[in-house]
Each structure stands twice: as structure tokens, then as C-alpha cells.
Image (cartoon, helix red, strand yellow):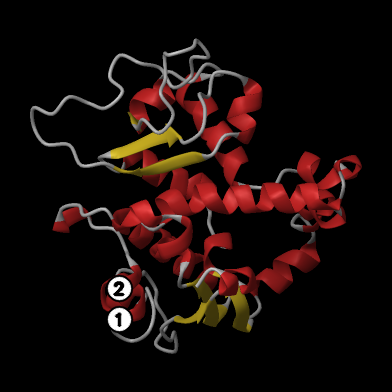
Amino acid sequence: MMFSLAKETMEKTKLWQIVHRMPKGALLHAHLDAMVDFDYLLNVVMETPGMHIASLDTHLGTPETRREANVSIRFKEQREGDVEPGAGRSIWSDQEGEYKPGTYILLTRAADAFPEGGRQGFLRWLKSRCTLSQTDAMEQHHGPAEIWRKFMKCFGVIASFLHYEPVWRAFLRRLMSLLMADGVFWTEIRYVLLLFSISAPELFTRVPASGRLINLTILCGGCFGPLSPLHPQEHQGLTRRPPEFYDPQPSGIVLRFWMSII
């Protein structure tokens, strides 16, 4: 809580500016899905063709459901002549029968129709579903378990769109550029290998080769990890890449409570 309140002040100090520019060496035990620059990446998601949004358990017609519903954003293939799923229906309506949970709506159409400020309001709302706010950190009267419940909900939303390959590549380029700017040239990245097979089995859906999803086969193939097939292209695309910049090496991990599921 105290860090979130002090962060903005700290980043304006001379000491912070000096530390920011100093070489850091290695970044250890970095959880990949928690290293997202959302102001950048959510705009990438909006600009990526074929992205759709769905609420998996209810409509998003009230502030409460928009805060608590299980939201999924993913690529959906549409061939020429196909009728758009959910056409003529609003995900933001709370009228019974207007929206069927699990129906994917074109993301740009849903964003433009967002009831609290259109597309810009939608981006603010979506960012709030992917991050913990100062309010979240300070509302201790809900009990110690509440912040962890919100924390896990954030990762559920993030995972639904982050691992779609065009978004994934943009995320990696942005991440490595930010690490370089911060003086970090070696990083130990941690990645949950079973994320797809257990928590999001629909990510195995086949889509065109030009827009495939990263799946468990790719995660475990090659040089052990999701970054291995992306190293050469993504690294060469970085500007001012120093010769001592080594490839990020992901470490595969699983969550303890999954041991009872496997």
C-alpha cells in the first residue's frame, strides 16, 4: 500500500533519476504476465484485427458486473461473408436476453459503445481489470483474501489476450526495450507452462497460420520456452541493441495447487 502511494513522488526525485540510469545487471524471478505496459499494449490489442471480447458468466450492463465478471479478449477468425457473432446485441446491456454470456463481440465495436466514455472510457475500464489500483490496495476492511482474489482476476483477463501471437510479439519488443532503457541486460523470466491446458483450454482453438495462438506445444518446444522461436526476429527489431544484450531465458514453472489437478 505504501509503495503505491509513494511511487509517483519517488519517480520525480533526483535520486530516482540517477538510479534509473545506472546499469542494473540482472533482473531475477520476473513473472512475465506481470511485466506488461498496459497503456501501450491495450492500444496494440485495439489495433489488432480480429480481436473480440466476451463476458463468460454475465452481461456487462452494470458497474458491478463490469467490475466482477469473468472477461475474455481473444482472436476470433472471421471469413468473408460470415455473420459477426453477437451482431445487433450489446454486451453493455443489462436487459434479460439481450446478451448471452460467452458470446464474443468485435472488440472495436464494443469499445466504441462503452457506456462510460466510449473507447477512451473502455480503455480505462479494461486497464482497471488488469491492474490493482490504490483503492484496491487500501481497502483493508474487505479482509486479507480480497486483494488476492482481485489479483488472480487480473491475471485471468491478461492471459486471455496477451498470448495471441501478434500481441505477444509486440509485448516482447516493448518489454525488452524498457528493460534496456532501465539498464537491465540479463533477465530470468518465469512463465507458467500449464496456463493454457488448465485455466484456458479454449486457447488451443485452431486459427490461421498468420494469426496462430501460442500453445503448450510451442511453449515446450525448441529451446525450452515461449521466447525461443521469437528471439532472432524480436531482438533484431530493437533499436540501439547493445552487443552484450543476451537472450531472455524463460524458466518454466507450475503453481503448487495444480499438483492435485495433474
Give the residue displayed 53% in from the left and 50% down from the top: 156
Distance between mark 2 and mark 1 Cα atoms: 5 Å
Residue 248 drawn at (x, y percent) = 45, 80
Instruction: Relative to 85, say whether 201 is above or below.
Output: below
Given the current orientation, which residue lies at the most extreme top position? Answer: 95
- Along the viewing direction, whichever of 88 and 49 lies nearer the viewer: 88
For image coordinates 39% across by 77% down, the residue present is 241
- Rendered image: mark on residue 221: 1
Residue 182: tell me if it is visible.
Answer: no
Tell me whether the residue at label 2 lies in contact with that at label 1, contact meaning CB atoms closer than 8 angstroms.
Answer: yes
Residue sitting at 41 percent across and 24 percent down?
100
Most distant residue in the right direction: 141
Return the x and y of residue 76 as percentages of the image width and height: 26, 41
Which residue occupies the foreground of this view, 262 or 231? Answer: 262
Category of crowding for the residue at label 2, using alpha-carbon neighbours closer than 10 angstroms: few (below 14), some (14–19), many (at least 20): some
Report whether residue 47 is seen: yes
> Where residue 103 sits in the image (x, y, percent)?
36, 30
Instruction: Name the element at disc 2.
Output: helix
Question: Extreme bottom residue here?
Answer: 244
Q: Is residue 55 left or right of residue 208?
A: right
Q: Which residue lies at the image location 59% right of the left edge and 71% below the top edge?
A: 260
Residue 242, horizontal then vertical, whole percent: 42, 82
Q: Which residue is mark 2?
A: 218
Quarter where residue 172 is shown: bottom left
The amino acid at mark 1 is: Gly
Up the image or down, 3 lies above or below 5; here it is below
